[in-house]
Image: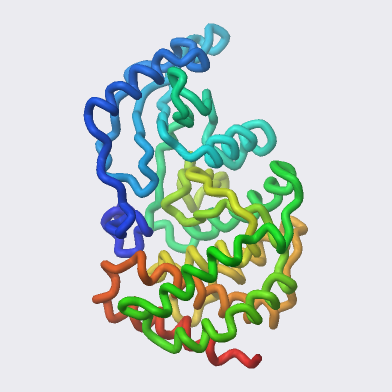
Amino acid sequence: MSSAEHPAAGPGDGGPRRRPPRAAAEVARWRRLLLAAPEVGGRLRRLTPLAVGGAWSGAMLYAGVWSAGAADGGAERPVVAKVAAGTREVCCTSALAVQAPDLIPTLYASGRHLGGEALPWMVAERCPYRLDYAWGDALFETLLDAGARFHLAGRTLAPAVGPGDVPLAAHHRLIRAGAAGPPPAPGPGAEVVARLEADAAWALGACRVELCHGDLHPGNAVWRVPPPDPASRALLIDFAPAASPWVAEPAYCQVLYWPVASRPGETGLVQRMAARRAAYGLEVPPPAALDRLATLYLAWNALRLWPLLTHRHGDPAYVAATRGWIAAAAALPR
């Protein structure tokens, strides 16, 4: 089953901010600019626009092949080219290609301009596997492992981040919007909002702030080798790097992919990422603090995603899950 067919595919699957498809003339013009880019050096060939609908980001994707140099026998490798990518995404991917290449598909070329225009772009390896729910827990385990390794790599990509770098005002604005509606999110959202500043201040002191991927979920990863092969590792794409308490990322992923990541009685993604972080020697809060953090960030993400995932409002299971996350946070002792 593809991500597009799954009810938890993500905020781009019909949400209110999906952008319309690019005009055919613009798609063709960008293709010409990309093929002529000096950084490409004539190695990019058979470039064809991918048949995608309106993208969440507004970027355009093309499929093609990259011709290797004579030392590699002139082999051709499948690639994906992305034009009108975010500047942060291109900068982050380019830095990772040097400092942590095992985290991303091979990057062949990139730049921030095309033909003198401010059009950030990349040409990267096209991996054969995307998310497959038949992989079960391995889907999330490989993703969380990559997320934890990104936290480690993020410490070398930019100056150290801390609580002062977290955009709390913007986050709180989204959380309040979800509680207020219309329609308001189910559950005692007003109670969660009433204690938001105090709980957020505690969370910033209880959890290490990292430079995070910014949009960590299975739709933003690819695989060269599928699970459960021991060599399988998720490779991350579509970066939106931002400073955040690290627990926010797995909590966001759990809310977004609730049917497959939130099974009753099983360990949540926050706790599972904590185990991955511990294996890499990264800081993890004590169990009681970790559970409280997970409860808060699940509720906050449920509230902020509620206005975006309007196509789920008629799903009783999703409404019940949202109500449960919000009620659990409201019931926490102060």
Instruction: Tell me which residue sits at (52%, 16%) in the image.
Output: 39
Q: Measured along the vertical axis of the image, is residue 218 above or below residue 103?
A: below
> In which quadrant is the N terminus drawn?
bottom left
Q: How many marks?
A: 0
Instruction: Tell me which residue sits at (51%, 48%) in the image.
Output: 229
Can residue 146 be seen by looking at this rendering? Answer: no
User: What is the residue that sits farthest to the top in this orientation?
Assistant: 70
User: What is the residue that sits farthest to the left in this orientation?
Assistant: 24
Counting from the top left corner in percent of width and height, residue 253 is at 48, 63
Instruction: Tell me which residue sits at (35%, 35%) in the image.
Output: 60
Q: Measured along the vertical axis of the image, is residue 306 above or below residue 159?
A: below
Q: Measured along the vertical axis of the image, is residue 269 above or below residue 243?
A: below
Q: Measured along the vertical axis of the image, is residue 4 above or below residue 225?
A: below
Name the side, left or right, on which 80 lies relative to 271: left
Quarter of the rendering containing residue 317? bottom left
> In which quadrant is the C terminus drawn?
bottom right
Counting from the top left corner in percent of width and height, residue 268 is at 54, 73
Can residue 152 be seen by looking at this rendering? Answer: yes
User: Nearest the camera: 74 or 308?
Assistant: 308
Name the side, left or right, on which 237 lies relative to 94: left
Q: How is the image coloured?
A: rainbow
Instruction: Tell me which residue sits at (59%, 36%) in the image.
Output: 91
User: Nearest the camera: 318 or 77?
Assistant: 318
Counting from the top left corner in percent of width and height, residue 169 is at 57, 66
